[in-house]
Amino acid sequence: MNTKHLISLLSAMLWLGVRVVPIFAASAAGVELSASAVAQPQMQALPAAEAAPAKASEWTMMVFMSGKNDLSRFVAQDINRMEMAGSGPGVNVVVQAATMNDGLGAVRYHITRDGNEGAIASRGERVQLADMGGKAALSEFMKWAMSAYPAKKYALIIWSHGFGWAGGAQSGDGKRALSPDVATGSVLSDRELSEVLGSVAKASGKQLDLLVTDACGMQMLSSLAELQGKAGIVVGSEDTVPADSGLPYQYIIERLNDNPGQDAQELSRFIADAYRDLHPDHVGVSAVRTDRIGTFVQKLNNWIDLVVASGKHENIADSISRLPGFYDYARSADLSGTPQPKDIFQLVEAVTQDLLFAKLASPQLIAAAEELQQYRGKIVLANSQGDLSGLSEYVPKDLYNSAYDDMKLSKMSRWDDFMKWLLDPQYSYPMPKPGKGGGAAS
């Protein structure tokens, strides 16, 4: 097992409630966490948030890097990759990064161009207290960046471990999704991320144009449903992201510098393509429009209702059980004993085809499946994930995690009821009355 696969496994252990001591984990993976692992720049004051706003640039890219875990080694590496392009006349790139060497704090940078990949040359300013797994650190960083470097369009990249809706542990509360800070024990939940983006949007008067998660397993429908109205487009992966080589930061920033006027849709498509070019043998990323999640959920509800109405529980459960899940594509860990998210469009196709083969699919069910597949091109703007289609979702293995009921998706869809019915064919599925539609549209 190579370094990045072991790191992915350790990440999964963290999400599943297994205590991982970061120094030991990094040592086991051959990762050194000494002070020399991160070349520290000379600290200089950056613009204060309350300073008079500068002229708005076209883009401000904010990168929030929680390396206070076994990813600590890779922080400086990716900052140096950003410096290979650097901020341009119409683009500002700002970073808040923390490693195992930063104690309870972090460092903020305004990224400037520099060709030395062995040291960080950009101006840095130390933040004394920054819980990188908490709401306050992310909120304060975003508000500072948007005030000190105002722009017409904003992108946020969250760099760290991720696991989407962390319902893998059957007794877990599902509140550990992204950006762990082992110094504090904090991890952002999907809802907390949504709350931060909502509060920042309210303060700035502007919704985030683009959110990118440089982290494993974040492209889940339940995670994205929490972000409706908070981020226009979300780019992320259904599966693993290589620890030592995630997003192609240099090329993304060069693309922005060459064409600052491009919009979030164009940039998201470029990121998906560039990611695949960088990782031809690895799972890629997709770009999803959050404003179309409501309509997608309506169509998904309609299909689910027809599937349950068929009454062919054994056929359906068997079809879904055979589908691969998170980590299966990367083959980086054996998590066969735990529930794994599965690709939604793969699931719809597999169930529909199996029922059709058994001559158990109604014309209405076939039509509903076709309508869902056709809508894929409207909600998924770009996808470089090979067999994966762009969206995954929680599928329990043996026991249903009741914390999932609190997710926004469970309130607007019947996916949660579908999962309960899969586990127990006697479950009283809330079939809608004739003439009543599915979930609320956005």
Image (cartoon, rainbow, N blue to C red):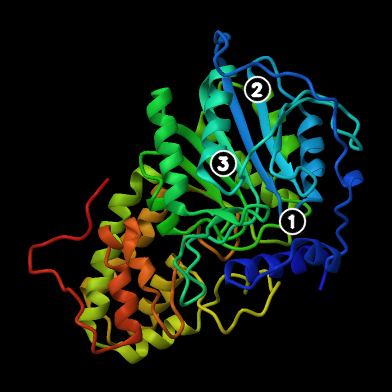
Residue type pointed to by label 2: Asn
For label 3, the residue is 269
Q: Nearer the viewer, residue 226 or 210?
A: 226
For label 1, the residue is 243
**Cα–Cα span, label 1 and label 2:** 25 Å
Q: Quadrant of residue 274?
A: top right
User: Is residue 11 visible to the viewer in this orientation of the structure?
Assistant: yes
- Earlier residue among tags 3 and 2: 2
Q: Identify the residue shown where x is 47% and y is 41%.
A: 233
Q: Is residue 342 left or right of residue 436?
A: right
Q: Which mark is residue 9?
A: none
For label 2, the residue is 92
- As drawn, 352 above or below 48: below
Residue type pointed to by label 3: Arg
Characterize the local packing of mark 1: few (<14), some (14-19) or many (20 or more) Cα atoms within 10 angstroms: many
Characterize the local packing of mark 3: few (<14), some (14-19) or many (20 or more) Cα atoms within 10 angstroms: some
Location of residue 250 in the rendering, given as x and y in whole percent from the top left corner: 75, 35
- As drawn, 92 above or below 335: above
**Total number of numbered labels?**
3
Q: Identify the residue shown where x is 89% and y is 29%.
A: 115
- Earlier residue among tags 1 and 3: 1
Q: Secondary structure at mark 1?
A: loop
Q: Identify the residue shown where x is 65% and y is 51%.
A: 160
- Earlier residue among tags 1 and 2: 2
